[in-house]
Amino acid sequence: MNTLVIYAHPKDTSYNAAIKDTVLEALKKRGDTVELRDLYAMDFNPVLRFDHQKAPDVEQEQKYISNADEIVIVNPIWWYSMPAILKGYIDRVLTYGFAYAYTENGVDGLLKGKRVTIINTAGGTQEAYASGGYDEALARTIVNGIYRFCGLEITKHHIVHNVIQGSDEYRAGALKEIAALFE
């Protein structure tokens, strides 16, 4: 299986980096052909300009997506959303005519047949996110409003809550859960 990993965190020693490394190891162990797109390491330009829609970097990213059977997205939740670099990637790469189109029957997600697993980290506890409606809001706006809108089949949306105050044992256990997602 061809798997594309899209990773968005600026710090090489972050817990998100440990998640990315766990995902890469699990995918390779599973026998996948893996392509990593580390948006910060690539210095990806997130700024959408309409004269850049057919820019070479956008066309290259669209090829990676086209060649993928599965996409894994790893990013933190900052201010109850994704990092700006990932939002810019989505704005520039998941474009009209590539990822979706409007038809007389409504929206047509053009990435049908591809699966996506979304792995996020959050500083708040699961209880705080649930009671504030944030998990539901993330699912509605990001999972449904972006990925499902484009026709992707959502395999899993996995949030590791409380990463800042959680213990080392908690974070290690979460990495094992993440590896198990790809068995």
Image: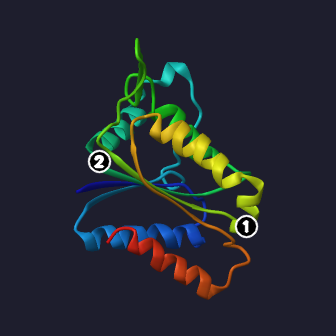
Instruction: Point out the image quarter for the C terminus.
Output: bottom left
Q: Is residue 78 visible?
A: yes
Are dots 2 and 1 in contact, CB under 8 Å? Answer: no
In the image: residue 68, left or right of residue 119: left
Quarter of the view holding residue 88: top right
Which mark lies nearer to you, 2 or 1? 1
Q: Position of residue 98 (x, y in %)?
A: 37, 28
Which of the two residues, 23 or 134, is positioned nearer the viewer here?
134
Quarter of the view holding residue 76: bottom right
Q: Residues within 10 Å of mark 1 (few under 14, many from 20)?
A: few
Q: Position of residue 149 (x, y in %)?
A: 47, 34
Residue drawn at 55 percent across, 37 percent down: 145
Q: Is residue 56 above or below residue 11?
A: above
Instruction: Point out the image quarter for the N terminus.
Output: bottom left
Which of the two residues, 176 or 56, is positioned nearer the viewer here?
176
In the image: residue 136, left or right of residue 72: right
Tell me the element at label 2.
Answer: loop
Tag shown at residue 127: 1
Q: Is residue 104 above or below residue 30?
A: above
Which of the two residues, 138 or 41, is positioned nearer the viewer here?
138
Seen as rendered, the residue at the extreme bottom is 169
Q: Position of residue 54 (x, y in %)?
A: 41, 24
Report the amino acid beneath label 1: Glu
Report the amino acid beneath label 2: Ala
Tag shown at residue 143: none
Residue annotated with mark 2: 68
Q: Is residue 157 above or below residue 126?
A: above
